[in-house]
Image (cartoon, rainbow, N blue to C red):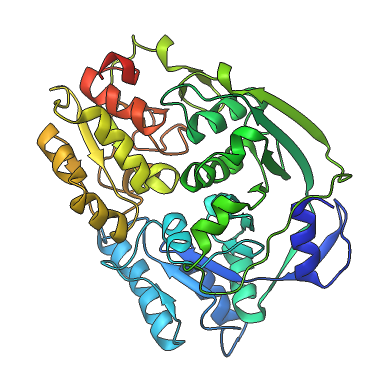
Amino acid sequence: MTITEKILAAHCGKKKVSPGELINAKVDLILANDITAPIAITEFKKIGAKNVFDKDRVAFIPDHFAPQKDIKAAEQCKMLRDFSKDYDLGLYFEVGRMGVEHALLPEQGLVGPGDLVIGADSHTCTYGGLGAFATGVGSTDVASAMATGECWFKVPESMKFIYFGKLKKWVGGKDLILHTIGDIGVDGALYRAMEFMGETISSLPMYARLTMCNMAIEAGGKNGIITPDSITEQYVKGRAKRGYTFYSSDKDAKYVEVREYDCSKIPLTVSCPHLPSNTKPAAELSHVTIDQVVVGSCTNGRIEDLREAAEIIKGKKVHPDVRMIVIPATQQIYLDAMKEGLAEIFVTAGAVFSTPTCGPCLGGHMGILAKGEKAIATTNRNFVGRMGHPESEVYLSNPAVAAASAVKGKIATPDEVV
């Protein structure tokens, strides 16, 4: 079996599962946010459930339109708060304690290797970076799982992606996943497990692994996953709130497709409007002027991402025609950025340093685009109207390219600035 099949088998009480098989599996953690939880709460009450299956395994995180941007957002967030209080949920994260959900849960040790996690948010697949099976589901699935502790799945086929060779300077996990999506397309892994492996992955730090698995959904994947190893152990040791299990694929596991990439040839990569698969080398896009730069999100809002952007922009200024918004993904990352002087670097350069929020990534708030405006962002999607007006444009990049672009006022590479 593959690692994905092993985790699913363990959670449905079977010795073996095969692709295409329908199973009912026990979940280790359920999460929802201020957009998706209200629907789940409404459905949960409709089915007459008296209680959630486990008060310490349901996480509600107001992060999309929070801090509450208007009356409707405030009412959505209040539903989460009231439900959490009424049902005594142990994992409700209020503004001031919250963060972007997919950065917060690993940081807090609430997700571990071998877990089965579902979330009413498509980027739940992030936790595959820890060696967990994690996938996004609908709010009604969350409602029934909150009551029963179980969810149904069709066991996905697995695709193997092998990465080898030394990465060029500034090239990281974001470039690897953008390059991969550019290669296979936004439906290239439709309802499949994307298993990332090879010598390059083995040496990738945890934040870069989480970034890669985060965007598996942008290739249509059911989940992204990386076999846990010593880097994983170092991350979860002393952090994990529960026991965890390291699974790995058998040598004779079957894959529907295998692809290999020589990472020494992968350039700094940018996704152009209006699909994550519309990729080009950053160096070929210097003609694109920009109005806004966003560094943050569940894809690239971790402390290492902020350090990377700060390294580029330190001692320089944001271009006069550009606004730059930097959003640490959690309160802890915010504090670390303050202590390390990163916040000061950004503010001195003329950037906004925001409280944790998903903010502009989904066209929420804190940086909506007007008609005709262009942004380069470390976020994960650039569909039509994703960050604001349907006639605005979003380019996706890693933090170093985003920061260099902020200085130049057009899409740029770090070497042009440093």
Within the image, what quadrant is residue 369 found in?
A: top left
Quarter of the image for residue 99 reads bottom left
Location of residue 2 with respect to 241 vertically, above or below: above
Foreground residue among 21 and 131: 131
The number of numbered discs placed on residues in the rendered structure image is 0
Residue 7 seen in the current view:
yes
Report which quarter residue 192 is drawn in: top right
Counting from the top left corner in percent of width and height, residue 346 is at 18, 38
Q: Quick check: 49 left or right of 416?
A: right
Along the viewing direction, whichever of 313 and 375 lies nearer the viewer:
313
109 or 164: which is nearer to us?
164
Residue most extreme to the bottom: 50
Residue at the farthest left position: 348
Above or below, 417 relative to 67: above
Residue 155 point in image, percent of width and height: 80, 55
237 versus 402 height, above or below: below
For image coordinates 30% across by 49% down, the residue present is 328
Q: Which residue is drawn at 45% across and 82% down?
A: 89
Where 17 sits versus 382, above or below? below
Q: Along the horizontal axis of the image, is 332 left or right of 209?
A: left
The quarter of the picture where the C terminus appears is top left
Expressed as whole percent of the image width and height from the top left, the position of residue 223 reads: 65, 49
Can see residue 24? Answer: no
Question: For this view, does 363 lie left or right of residue 229?
Answer: left
Q: Is residue 126 left or right of residue 1?
A: left
Asked whether 8 or 416 is in front, the reply is 416
Residue drawn at x 47%, y 56% as measured from the top left: 102
Q: Residue at 74%, 37% (x, y): give it.
A: 160
